[in-house]
């Protein structure tokens, strides 16, 4: 079958299914078994999606027609799938266990990956044992990661998610994340941190990102001022650089022995598995970090080997394609029912929207239909008191991902266990009401209610159920989303590994900085920008 025939079959199915409410579909008692999929302790429940098991067969036929299996092989074997930048996207190699090999341009890259892990381990041990000392000889007790986008969100999200997994040795180290270019996070921190015991980790794949370099320069000056020592001494004791551009890090002043490197075949938003994950390893120890990699590797193998019809990331992607391209749903909410996953929505916003927010295909032609939807989210229970009103009674169709661990607080008091039960109950209840609307009520009272009290339902959702939120399970979860993004990109025919759309804004901001200092410099600004610029400069001069 050709992709066109598959799309046409799917359109027919969508026409037939659109009038059918989820309450009707869910009356088929076989549905849960037919539409839940499991791999290595991770459960994907698609039973509240507005489709039938046969629809999945049709979607799989589309994936086959788009040669998905071949494209998965290309990704994992290191073909240059990032074609606009002429390179591979080998985040899967970062979690390949020692002993295996993968050749890229004649080099076994697993060897390099393992040797970086060994360097990270040595560094983590030095820090945990109080052997990394600041300029005064005191042990480092505070680490500040300075980075943005992929050099911030992965470590930030993971450190928060796995905060229960700190080994004893890590408990004496305070960890902070600074990303915003305006200095608001850093200025607050600097006023309360002790310079003598603070280590800065500069995380930047390119080592040219102005946000990161601006924060880094402020931090460096703070240390020089506090210590009255040479910059060179400060840089040696208080700065680590993590980058794919060692010359640029050296130019900035990071001594080579304080550099941890990764490779241009690791995309920024796919880099938490590389040396960029150092804050994670500092927080949960190297053993925990390796469990995270193992969880992701388990999904990599599954993605590579499982039949498409049982393949968790593929199914998650196909359901997205169904919602976006066949049911015309263009909003996607990420709703974790576990406060430790507070940063997961922000992480997935970058992963999905920076990867698949594209409208040009690999051959340069325009995409036929919609690609990545607008994605946002919040801890589910908090979102219930914020934007769920729109989900329940607004005019937008929204697809939702509920993410929840079955077990939590198993070794804690009754009260906390009860709180987890409460979160579980809310997660199940919300998924149910979104699907069924007021038909979720057992009696007929809904039909007598006024219109403003009615619930339409029919909002599709997926539930991802983890056994427990562990480093291994989080690694699985993130890898599922990464491969979902790749699968969708294959079907849309786009490159998920570049981000040319953010470059122009960066270039323009540099030019605008000169305009702020020398108004009228270019003489070619539009009236909206020059009007605002004048107003700002007047206010700044007052
Ligand atoms: O702004 C886009 C981007 O390039 C992201 O893709 C990346 O994660 C982020 O900036 C940070 O880049 P770097 O790690 O090179 O500082």
Image (spheres, helix red, strand yellow):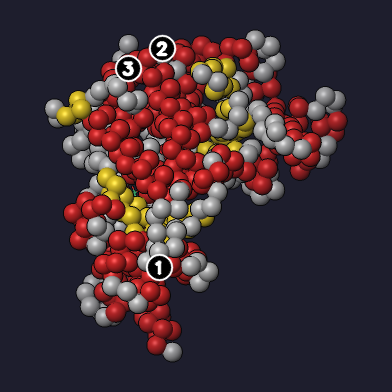
Question: Which residue occupies 51% across, 11% down?
Answer: 54
Name the quarter where the N terminus is drawn: top left
Residue extending furthest toward the bottom: 542
Percent position (x, y) of residue 415?
Answer: 79, 39
Tag 2 or tag 1, which sits nearer the N-term?
1
| 287 is higher (above) or lower (below) than 21 | below
Q: Tell me if I can see residue 222 in this picture.
A: yes
Count residues near mark 2 (Cα–Cα under 10 Å), then give few for <14, some for 14-19, many for 20+: few
Name the element at disc 2.
Answer: loop
Name the element at disc 1.
Answer: loop
Name the element at disc 3.
Answer: helix
Q: Are marks 3 and 2 in contact (CB under 8 Å)?
A: no
Mark 1 Cβ inside 8 Å of ligand 1 = no
| 283 is higher (above) or lower (below) than 81 | below
Give the Cα distance between marks 3 and 1.
57 Å
Percent position (x, y) of residue 502?
Answer: 32, 52
| 491 is higher (above) or lower (below) than 56 | below
Left or right of 502 in this view: 188: right
Q: Splitting the image into 4 quarters, where does residue 342 fall?
A: top right
Task: Determine which of the numbered discs, if any, sits on residue 69 in the image.
Answer: 3
Q: Splitting the image into 4 quarters, where does residue 438 fall?
A: top right
- Circle 1 is placed at which residue position? 136
Q: Are marks 3 and 1 in contact (CB under 8 Å)?
A: no
Left or right of 428 in this view: 361: left
Percent position (x, y) of residue 239?
Answer: 34, 59
Question: Which residue occupies 20% across, 27% down?
Answer: 108
Give the Cα distance between marks 3 and 2.
9 Å
| 231 is higher (above) or lower (below) than 121 | below
Tag 2 or tag 3, which sits nearer the N-term?
3
* Callout in the foreground (3, 1): 1
Question: Which residue occupies 25% across, 41% down?
Answer: 263
- Circle 2 is placed at which residue position? 307
């Amino acid at each position: 079958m050709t992709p066109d025939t598959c799309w046409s079959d799917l359109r027919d199915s969508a026409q037939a299914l659109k009038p059918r409410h989820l309450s009707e579909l869910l009356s088929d008692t076989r549905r849960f078994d037919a539409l839940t999929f499991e791999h290595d302790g991770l459960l994907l429940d698609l039973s509240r999606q507005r489709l039938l098991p046969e629809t999945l067969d049709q979607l799989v036929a589309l994936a086959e027609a788009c040669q998905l299996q071949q494209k998965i092989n290309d990704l994992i074997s290191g073909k240059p799938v990032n074609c606009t930048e002429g390179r591979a996207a080998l985040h899967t190699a970062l979690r390949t266990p020692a002993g295996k090999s993968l050749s890229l341009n004649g080099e076994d890259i697993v060897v390099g990956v393992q040797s970086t892990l060994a360097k990270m381990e040595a560094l983590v041990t030095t820090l945990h044992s109080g052997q990394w000392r600041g300029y005064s000889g005191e042990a480092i007790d505070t680490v500040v990661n300075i980075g943005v986008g992929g050099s911030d969100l992965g470590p930030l999200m993971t450190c928060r998610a796995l905060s229960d997994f700190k080994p004893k040795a890590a408990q004496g180290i305070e960890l902070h994340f600074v990303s915003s270019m305006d200095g608001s996070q850093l200025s607050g921190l600097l006023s309360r941190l002790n310079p003598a015991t603070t280590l800065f980790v500069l995380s930047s794949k390119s080592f040219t990102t102005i946000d990161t370099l601006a924060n880094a320069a402020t931090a460096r000056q703070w240390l020089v001022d506090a210590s009255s020592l040479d910059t060179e001494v400060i840089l040696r004791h208080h700065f680590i650089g993590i980058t794919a551009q060692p010359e640029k890090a050296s130019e900035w002043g990071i001594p080579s022995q304080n550099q941890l490197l990764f490779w241009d075949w690791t995309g920024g938003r796919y880099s938490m598995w590389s040396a960029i994950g150092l804050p994670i390893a500092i927080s949960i120890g190297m053993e925990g970090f390796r469990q995270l990699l193992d969880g992701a590797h388990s999904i990599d193998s599954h993605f590579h080997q499982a039949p498409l019809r049982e393949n968790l990331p593929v199914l998650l992607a196909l359901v997205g394609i169904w919602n976006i391209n066949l049911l015309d749903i263009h909003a996607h909410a990420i709703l974790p029912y576990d406060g430790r996953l507070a940063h997961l929505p922000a992480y997935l916003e970058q992963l999905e929207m920076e990867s698949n927010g594209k409208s040009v295909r690999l051959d340069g032609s325009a995409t036929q239909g919609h690609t990545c939807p607008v994605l946002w989210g919040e801890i589910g229970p908090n979102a219930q008191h914020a934007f769920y009103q729109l989900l329940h009674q607004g005019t937008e169709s929204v697809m939702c991902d509920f993410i929840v661990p079955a077990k939590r607080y198993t070794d804690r008091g009754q009260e906390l266990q009860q709180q987890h039960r409460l979160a579980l109950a809310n997660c199940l209840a919300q998924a149910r009401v979104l699907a069924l609307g007021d038909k979720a009520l057992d009696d007929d009272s809904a039909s007598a209610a006024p219109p403003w009290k009615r619930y339409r339902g029919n909002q599709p959702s997926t539930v991802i159920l983890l056994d427990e939120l562990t480093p291994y399970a989080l690694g699985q979860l993130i890898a599922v989303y990464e491969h979902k993004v790749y699968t969708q990109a294959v079907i849309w025919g786009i490159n998920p590994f570049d981000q040319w759309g953010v470059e122009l804004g960066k270039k323009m901001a540099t030019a605008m900085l000169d305009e702020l200092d020398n108004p009228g410099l270019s003489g070619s600004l539009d009236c909206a920008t020059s009007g605002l610029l004048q107003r700002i400069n007047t206010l700044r001069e007052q």
